[in-house]
Image (cartoon, grey):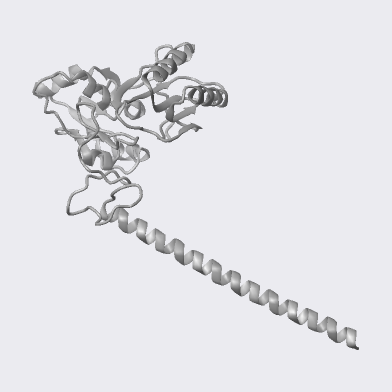
Amino acid sequence: MDVVISFYKFVTIKNPSLLRESLQATTARLQIMGSIIVAEEGINGMLSGSEANIRSFEQEMHTDARFADLEFKESLYDDVSFRRMLVKQKKEIITLRQPIDPQKDTGAYLDPLEFKKWQDEAKDMVILDTRNDYEVALGTFKNAVDPKIRSFGEFPEWVDQNLSADKEKTIVTFCTGGIRCEKATAYMKMKGFTNVYQIEGGILKYFEKTLQEEGDNHWQGDCVVFDKRKAIDKKLEPSRKEICYVCLAELTPANKASEPRAAGHACTTCDAQMEQSHRERVARGMQRHADNLKRRHTFLLAQKEHFKGLRHDHMS
């Protein structure tokens, strides 16, 4: 059984390439799979492995002063969550392309149980989902606002166009593990929002802390996760829904492709796009083959004329 952990921290890393090399060596030695992003602004990762090896990884991370307080969100999976290990260096650990620093100013952390209490009491607040549209489609909190963004980079523009009149309201943001909300709330505070919160630890921590809570019907649906499970329910167990392996939309009799592919079932939209892409690749391959034959034919004709000329000169 795999132990799956996710983590992030905004912290200054002066030499990300050295950290990248160190993490590559550590995860290889511990036979851990998954992905980690490192940047000058911090670290963001999701990993899986045996419990013993995951605990060793956590302990080694905590020996680094920069990550001594690094928090790990955890779930279990009775299969292999990741097939390979990638440690990548990027400009941002979560891309927003805005001049903000979550280390300096971000939204207030709201404990998941306190957020549940606010929902129980029907507190006057705006619950804002900062995730992408396909994630929201699979599950979200009741009455949450869906910005319908295709990527996190669209979030600032959506805020500017849709929330400018709500700068004094209580706004609670949430995302899968918390990292997007760090930047989302930092941006909102930079824009003059005065009462902005983020659910501490995101949806995953909410699930973990409300696992034993009876009658919690605030969350509706499942939560997309970026490993082989595709999504989990609020009991932190793999979703029982059949999900398109490309776009992560729920499959129904109306949108499920008739035939599975090597990686599993896809929705009709993704299946049609892959089929079209395949046809285009085949067409390009055939065109390249035809072009190569034409060039070869031209070359052979030129060679024939060349040798014909040599024979004529020799006979002369």
In the foreground, 166 or 245: 245
* Residue 204 on image: x %, y %: 27, 25
Residue at image position (31%, 53%) is: 270
The picture quadrant where one finds residue 196 is top left
Q: Indicate whether 266 appears above or below 159.
A: below
Q: Quadrant of the C terminus?
A: bottom right
Determine if residue 146 is in view: no
The residue at 40%/12% (across/down) is: 69
> Toward the viewer: 182 or 241?
241
Where is residue 301 shown, x and y percent of the image? Answer: 70, 79
Q: In which quadrant is the N terminus drawn?
A: top left
Q: Does 152 sit above or below residue 275? A: above
The residue nearer to you, when weighing 173 against 35, is: 35
State which quadrant residue 132 falls in: top left
Above or below, 141 against 242 in this view is above
Residue 114 place in picture, x, y as percent: 18, 17
Q: Establish if 203 lies above or below 153.
A: above
Residue that appears at 20% across and 40% down: 241
Query: In percent of the image, x 32 and y 37: which residue is there?
Result: 155
- Residue 184 in picture, x, y percent from top left: 33, 30
Q: Nearer the viewer, residue 106 or 1?
A: 1
Residue 253 appears in view: yes
The reply, left or right, for residue 259 in relation to residue 313 is: left
Tell me the quarter of the picture where residue 298 sits.
Answer: bottom right
What number of labels is visible?
0
